[in-house]
Amino acid sequence: MNGQLTDIFFDLDHTLWDFEKNSAATFELLFQTHQLGVNLKEFNALYTPINRRYWKAYQNSEISKETLRYGRLKDAFDALNLTLEEGLIHQLAEGYMQHLTSFSHVFAHTHDTLSYLKSKYRLHILTNGFKEIQHKKLSGAKMDQFFTCVINAEEVGVKKPHPEIFIAALEMAKVKPECALMIGDDLEADVYGALNAGIQAIHFNIEQLETDTSCSSITCLSELKGLL
């Protein structure tokens, strides 16, 4: 890493906040509340890739937030060959957003790694997630005290990997690109987006998928203590 490093930007979902685990817990609650005889394991196996496709389209500004929220559920139930009334799907979509932040699972070594890094650098969040719940996620998981700035794509008006959101993040944090580092799970949005803005990047590759050898990669947050 560059010796001038002063500021670190973290993605939130899938990097610090364990989205899949919290999402599964939310669906378990909703299915019990609405007495839906849905196999949670089968549903999540179908929902996870569908949700990622919808998020990719949302990230690329191809669909609206409302389309994402409804469509990912409708497609998942369709894949299960389960027909639900449109009103119920909207109800579940609303309930999902309402209860998601009730759960606060984070990845292993999140808090101790953030505590270590905060003693050396200024830490920030840079997220494409919905602005109305990202602060609740941070607060619920007791992470808000670690971060100086929380930059949200909805507030900036553009999403990662667009260069403008990284420029806006640098301006808000009052840091030069050569003194900043981005850490996230999405190669396109987090890593390439940062590199294209002149910011160093580390890929959080917890799923141990094929990664780009041109950038640093970690599979556990605790590895950052040896790098930074």
Image: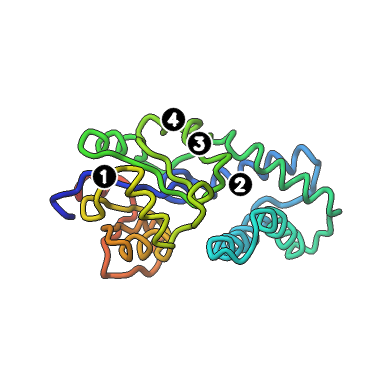
Report the mark closest to the observer, 2 or 4.
4
* Separation of residues labelled 1 and 2 (CA atoms): 33 Å
Q: Give the total of numbered labels.
A: 4
Callout 1, which amino acid?
Answer: Asp
Q: Which quadrant of the structure image shows residue 95?
A: top right
Towards the viewer: 21 or 128: 128
Which of the pair 36/175 is nearer the observer? 175
Q: Earlier in the sequence, mark 1 or mark 2?
A: 1
Q: Residue at x 34, y 52 (%)?
A: 183
Q: Residue at position x 81%, y 59% from top?
A: 82
Image: 223 above or below 110: below
| Tag 4 residue | 142
| Sequence order check, earlier mark of 1 and 3 | 1
Q: Whole-Å distance between the Cαs marked 2 and 4?
A: 20 Å
Of 227 and 150, which appears nearest the observer?
150
| Residue bearing mark 2 | 24
Q: Secondary structure at mark 1?
A: strand
On screen, residue 147 versus residue 59, left or right, reads: left
Indicate the position of residue 49 as horizontal and vertical percent values: 59, 63
Badge 2 amino acid? Ala
User: How many angstroms separate mark 3 from mark 4 (CA)?
Assistant: 10 Å
Foreground tag (3 vs 4): 3
Structural crowding at the residue carrying mark 3, measured as other residues with C-alpha within 10 Å and reported as few (<14), some (14–19) or many (≥20): some
Point out residue 154 in the picture as x, y percentages from the top left corner.
53, 49
Indicate left or right for 156 with 216 as reference.
right
Which of the two discs, 2 and 3, labels the residue nearer the N terminus?
2
The kind of secondary structure element at disc 2 is helix
Q: Rounded to the nearest whole Å, what is the CA distance between mark 1 and mark 3?
A: 20 Å
Residue 135 has which mark?
3
Q: Secondary structure at mark 4?
A: loop
